């Protein structure tokens, strides 16, 4: 599932063709994805101007001039692809329709945004903009890890007394928003912290290293366009490249890249998810 860097990369790819632009026509080609689309969604989108395109955790939020906000979740295999307008250095013509093109949005400026989702785990909803942050999907989210609300004091307070492994705690979106399995594994490696260590037993030095590592990993992943392991693509259809910089994720049995370590990357299962780490240098 796309994590914060992938969703932020998609947002940055969509913003130039959506922000400030009018939706000339919206088409909805099926009744539902993970849940039913909102009533009359195509009509409610058509003619609306996109005031701003934001990201909250793993959600895209398009604020419209009609007082509604379009919420988008990419799910496991969702893609939002731009055609008919310059994206980066290229102009992508409108492709032929595909089987899993579930929502198509034509902008007045000529761009087309196609939401394609073969597995149909993605979702879209229309929220009242004035109360959007109170929506059940958004209300209990923790601070953005690249924002001012995420710092050592917050993380120390949020983890204090927790008897769960730190890996599981960091996947809790109420503690910090947008992190997923890939970037938690990578951040814990950089911070030298075992995924098995109890969250409430980190101490100030580990908290400081972990806070910095989370910010660094996410910043570098966004700069690389995210990580493409299976389905994820940027708005121009190209892959992300951060997977080539993974230190631990997916590297079971490979040598640890920390100079002088000599260990090998191991995989364990925690809460039905794979955790990759170096038992030698993560304590």
Image (tube, rainbow, N blue to C red):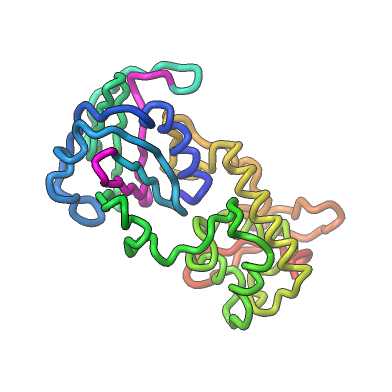
Left or right? Give the position of 254 relative to 260.
Answer: left
Residue drawn 49% across and 42% down? 8
Image coords of residue 268 (percent x, y) = 59, 68
Q: Foreground: 139 or 206?
A: 139
Image coords of residue 175 (percent x, y) = 53, 67
Tell which residue pokes out farthest to the right in this image. Answer: 260
Q: Is residue 67 magenta?
A: yes
Q: Foreground: 231 or 21?
A: 21
Left or right? Give the position of 54 relative to 202.
Answer: left
Query: Which span of residues is magenta-colored?
Result: 65-86
Residue drawn 59% across and 83% down? 163
Image coords of residue 165 (percent x, y) = 60, 75
Q: Up-down: is 200 above or below 80? A: below
Residue drawn 36% across and 29% down? 20
Q: Is residue 173 magenta?
A: no
Image coords of residue 60 (percent x, y) = 39, 46
Is residue 265 at all visible to an observer of this figure? Answer: no
Residue drawn 57% across and 41% down? 222
Q: Foreground: 13 or 45?
A: 45
Number of numbered discs on residues: 0
Residue 202 lies in what quarter of the image? bottom right
Q: Quadrant of the C terminus?
A: bottom right
Is residue 174 at all visible to an observer of this figure? Answer: yes
Left or right? Give the position of 3 relative to 133.
Answer: right
């Amino acid at each position: 599932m796309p994590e914060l860097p992938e969703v932020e990369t998609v947002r940055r790819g969509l913003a130039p063709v959506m922000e400030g632009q009018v939706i000339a026509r919206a088409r909805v080609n099926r009744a539902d994805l993970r849940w039913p689309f909102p009533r009359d969604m195509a009509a409610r989108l058509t003619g609306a101007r996109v005031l701003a395109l934001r990201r909250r955790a793993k959600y895209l939020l398009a604020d419209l001039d009609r007082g509604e906000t379009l919420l988008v979740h990419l799910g496991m295999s969702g893609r939002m692809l731009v055609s008919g307008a310059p994206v980066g250095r290229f102009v992508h013509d409108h492709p032929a329709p595909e089987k899993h093109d579930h929502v198509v949005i034509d902008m007045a400026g000529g761009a087309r945004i196609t939401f394609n989702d073969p597995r149909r785990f993605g979702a879209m909803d229309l929220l009242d903009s004035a109360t959007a942050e109170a929506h059940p999907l958004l209300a209990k989210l923790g601070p953005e890890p690249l924002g001012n609300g995420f710092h050592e004091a917050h993380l120390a307070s949020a983890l204090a007394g927790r008897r769960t492994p730190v890996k599981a705690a960091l996947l809790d979106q109420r503690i910090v928003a947008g992190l997923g399995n890939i970037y938690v594994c990578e951040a814990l490696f950089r911070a030298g912290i075992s995924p098995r260590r109890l969250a409430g037993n980190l101490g100030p030095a580990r908290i400081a290293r972990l806070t910095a590592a989370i910010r660094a990993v996410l910043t570098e992943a966004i700069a690389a366009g995210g990580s493409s392991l299976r389905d994820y693509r940027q708005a121009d259809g190209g892959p992300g490249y951060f997977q080539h910089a993974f230190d631990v994720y997916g590297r079971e049995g490979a040598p640890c890249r920390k100079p002088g370590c000599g260990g090998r990357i191991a995989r364990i299962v925690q809460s039905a998810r794979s955790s990759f780490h170096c038992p030698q240098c993560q304590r």
